[in-house]
Amino acid sequence: NSEIRETIVIPRYIRVNTLKASVKKVIEHFQAKGFTQEEPIDDLKNIRPKTIRKDKHLPDLLILPPNTDLHEDALYLSGDIILQDKASCIPAFICSPPFNSHVIDACAAPGNKTSHLSAIMQNTGKIWAFDFDKHRLNLLKKLIQKAGCKNVEAIHESFLDVDPMEQKYSNVGYILLDPSCSGSGIINRLDHLIDASDETQEQLDLSHRFKEQRLENLSEFQEKMILHAFKFRSVQKIIYSTCSIYAEENEHVIKRALDQTDHFVLANKNDMMPSWPRRGISSEINDDEGIAEKFIRTSPNEDYTNGFFVACFVRKTAQPINTE
Ligand code: SAM
């Protein structure tokens, strides 16, 4: 039990909120506090104390030693930096909507990815941020205000109830879909990997059946959300992500959704952080076409970030997107 917890230690990642600050300004801020800038590296296991470095893959991400407490830091309090794990920064980076795009963040709260999209778009265009949980949506409203996002409209509604034919969504070109999932990739929830030797066989069978049922329910919901996103007539790119390590919520869901569309395919590996080593699990699906390599997976043990899965659908025949 303690062995797993001890081996998985992830650094303190900070995303520079480029609506308010630059990477250079943030590095200088930490240098003034006694930190030394070091070169980007792959092996983040033993980061020296009081060091700061750029991430190797994401341009607005900086890396500090694990457990660096920044809750009283002036740049955190002002919203210039956002404490966001690396894996959770990948979906908006893959989406990268151009300036003036119309975007839907379908499951947006508490808003980390919404504010990342807003920063990438530099407050141009429009983001409709939906969440059906009022309490979580209030957290999003606070977060986007603190981050200085001015192109976001927060809406308390189920994405499944949003009418894709409504005129105001006619130019939506990008949908970010980060639905509820088992959360099994989040480091402090990796308890399911721990040997349950104290439990009786009966208890184990029961919890196994419970887990299977839960995954089935989640994956049905996740598939429904993708099929709904397919209905938006101008959408060119749909980013799907989970913080789950289970293929049931990842490869299986994507494969089933692909089987039900004639209009969308998966984005090429070249557009999916091609140098990233960890891809989808081919053996989990009938993968004659080699689609698994188009997915991104992250693994806590090897990548020093939470377990995540990212896929990107693109429309087969690209249509021009009208922007305001
Ligand atoms: N994207 C968020 C972020 O980066 O801060 C995290 C999203 S969290 C994984 C999933 C969210 O989906 C929850 O806030 C949940 O309330 C919301 N949700 C679940 N079903 C939904 C639905 N049908 N429509 C809109 N939001 C939904």
Image (tube, rainbow, N blue to C red):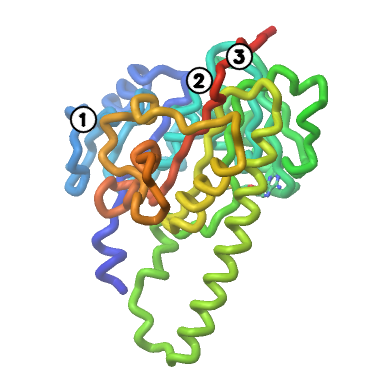
Q: Nearer the viewer, residue 311 or 50?
A: 311
Mark 3 and mark 2 in contact (Cβ < 8 Å)? no
What amino acid is found at the position of numbered circle 3 in the picture? Gln
Q: Residues within 10 Å of mark 1 (few under 14, many from 20)?
A: some
Residue closest to the eye, 250 or 123: 250
- Disc nearer the start of the sequence (1/2): 1
The picture places residue 176, in percent across and down from the top left corner, at: 58, 33
Decide if residue 120 is on the left or right side of residue 36. right
Q: Amino acid at mark 2?
A: Ile
Give the number of the mark in front: 1 or 3.
Answer: 3
In the rendered image of this protein, does residue 266 appear above or below residue 28?
below
Residue at 65%, 44% (x, y): give it.
225
Q: Nearer the viewer, residue 264 or 133?
A: 264
Q: In which image quadrant can residue 85 be found? A: top left
Q: Is residue 170 left or right of residue 262?
A: right
Q: Are marks 1 and 3 in contact (CB under 8 Å)?
A: no
CA–CA distance in space, label 1 to label 3: 38 Å
Q: Residue at x 72, y 27 (%)?
A: 153
Q: Is residue 105 left or right of residue 194?
A: right
Asked whether mark 1 lies closer than 8 Å to ligand 1, one says no
Q: Amino acid at mark 1?
A: Pro
Q: Earlier in the sequence, mark 1 or mark 3?
A: 1
Q: Which mark is residue 120?
A: 2
Residue under pointer 3: 319
How far from the left and from the top, in percent, is residue 134?
75, 47
Q: Residue 152's image quarter?
A: top right
Q: Nearer the viewer, mark 2 or mark 3?
A: 3
* Label 1 SS: loop
Res. 40 mark: 1
- The secondary structure type at the circle numbered 2 is helix
Who is closer to the viewer here, 241 or 89?
Answer: 241
